Image (spheres, rainbow, N blue to C red):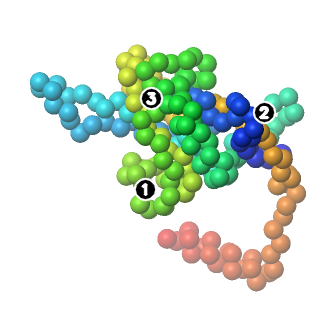
Amino acid sequence: MRIVELILDEEMEDSGVEAISIVESPAIESDFVALKNEEIKLAEISKEKKILMGALLIPNKPIYRQGDDGEYYIFFSKDTIAKASQMYLKNGYQKNSTLEHEQTLSGLTLVESWLVEDEVHDKSRKYGLNVPVGTWMGSVKVDNEDIWQEYVKKGIVKGFSIEGYFADKMESPKDSIKEKMSSDDLILSEIKNILNANK
């Protein structure tokens, strides 16, 4: 199956991420975490922060696609993700949001954006998100009460998906690549598998 690397074409005016969509089935297969404040007391009333945190793009993660040319996978490199995250903020797109890539939403704003730089000491770990280094993380404030009540609280939307324009860079099919191992390597590999299974 074809594997296509998507890259930013900085000469294209429309290149990059234009919006963040909240979706039921994120293409990157990483659900967000709905963050709640411990308790903000205002005249005896507790209110939620109404913030969603999750992965926006994960580096080198194969994302299945099906188009006119058949089935294939796309992926983004760490470098492309870093550039895309910067361009998104530079272009002032923080309030560009959609629901399932179909309905434009108001009242959703990207209020925090960062790249994971450490596997242990990253904010994402505090919330149980085990994403690789180079992942673009985001926190979105939901000031749209209908979306919060009908989609977030009911668990209908589970993650983020990006919308944008990227150029593609073809790679050779990975199906034809086979790793050659000597019999000693195979035995060592079997031993490691057994040891890992017993942990």
Report how far apart the C-alphas of labels 2 and 1 lie in the structure. Answer: 34 Å
Residue for badge 1: 122
Element carrying mark 2: strand
Q: Residues within 10 Å of mark 3 (few under 14, many from 20)?
A: some
- Residue at image x 83%, y 72%? 180
Residue for badge 3: 109
The type of residue carrying mark 1 is Asp
Kindly indicate whether the residue at mark 1 contacts the one at mark 2 (C-beta within 8 angstroms). Answer: no
Badge 2 or badge 1: first in the primary sequence: 2
The type of residue carrying mark 3 is Thr
Kindly indicate whether the residue at mark 1 contacts the one at mark 3 (C-beta within 8 angstroms). Answer: no
- Residue at image x 31%, y 36%? 36
Whether residue 29 can be seen here: no
Q: Quadrant of residue 104?
A: top right
Measured from the top left, where is residue 182 in percent x and y?
81, 80
Horizontally, is 173 left or right of 25 in the view? right
Horizontally, is 186 left or right of 180 in the view? left
Q: Quadrant of residue 9?
A: top right
Report how far apart the C-alphas of labels 3 and 1 lie in the structure. Answer: 22 Å
Whether residue 163 can be seen here: yes
